[in-house]
Image (cartoon, rainbow, N blue to C red):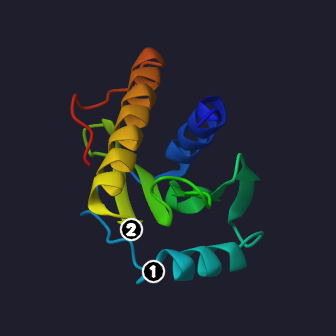
């Protein structure tokens, strides 16, 4: 994904709005990728921002410090959605919690999650460079 600076900006801005307590991992909350896309796109403009770039649909929920990334048609892991949420611990550390729903074969889903884990690590490094504490391991 070529929009790493945009993603980083959105996630850092969203982190400012996130609560300081770290709740348990939240399930994805949808039974299918199509239903997630339909429901989230319907919220556009109601505290939610939907964008389309390079075939990806990205849904940002600033109030929840969450970003949903939907794979484009033709992507090796289509259909899939990955939700990343900025979490703050009581000690002030910041992490990126990742949840996904992938309807592609397991090997493609694993590859997609590995790519997001690498992106999360780059975000972690950028946050560290800005002086924020980030745990050495980001949750998968």
- Name the foreground residue: 19 vs 128: 128
Mark 2 closeness class: few <14, some 14–19, many ≥20 residues within 10 Å:
many
Q: Position of residue 52 (x, y in %)?
A: 74, 54
Q: Are marks 1 and 2 in contact (CB under 8 Å)?
A: yes
Q: Position of residue 42 (x, y in %)?
A: 70, 79
Q: Position of residue 81 (x, y in %)?
A: 48, 62
Task: Mark yes or no: residue 21 visible.
Answer: no
- Name the foreground residue: 136 vs 31: 31
Image point 51% across, 56% down: which residue?
A: 66
For the image, the number of numbered tags is: 2
* SS at circle 2: strand
CA separation in Å, label 1 and label 2: 7 Å
Q: Does residue 28 lie above or below 116 as drawn?
A: below
Which label belongs to residue 32? 1
Image point 24% across, 63% down: which residue?
A: 24
Q: Which residue is mark 2?
A: 101
Image point 36% across, 30% down: which residue?
A: 121
Please state, as top left, top right, bottom left or bottom right, where the N terminus lies in the image: top right
Q: Residue furthest top?
A: 129
Q: Can you tell which quarter of the image residue 23 is in?
A: bottom left
Q: Does residue 136 lie above or below 116 as drawn?
A: above
**First in sequence: mark 1 or mark 2?**
1
Q: Residue furthest right?
A: 45
Image point 28% across, 45% down: which residue?
A: 89
Which label belongs to residue 8? none
Task: Mark yes or no: residue 109 visible.
Answer: yes
């Amino acid at each position: 994904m070529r929009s790493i600076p945009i993603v980083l900006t959105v996630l850092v801005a969203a982190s400012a709005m996130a609560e300081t307590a770290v709740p348990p991992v939240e399930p994805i909350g949808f039974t299918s990728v199509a239903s997630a896309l339909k429901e989230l796109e319907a919220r556009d403009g109601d505290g939610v921002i939907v964008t389309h770039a390079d075939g990806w649909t990205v849904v940002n929920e600033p109030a929840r410090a969450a970003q949903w990334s939907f794979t484009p048609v033709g992507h090796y892991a289509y259909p899939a959605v990955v939700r990343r949420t900025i979490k703050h611990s009581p000690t002030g550390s910041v992490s990126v919690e990742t949840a996904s729903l992938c309807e592609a074969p397991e090997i493609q889903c694993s590859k997609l999650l590995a790519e997001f884990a690498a992106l999360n690590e780059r975000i972690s490094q950028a946050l560290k460079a800005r002086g924020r504490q980030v745990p050495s391991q980001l949750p998968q």
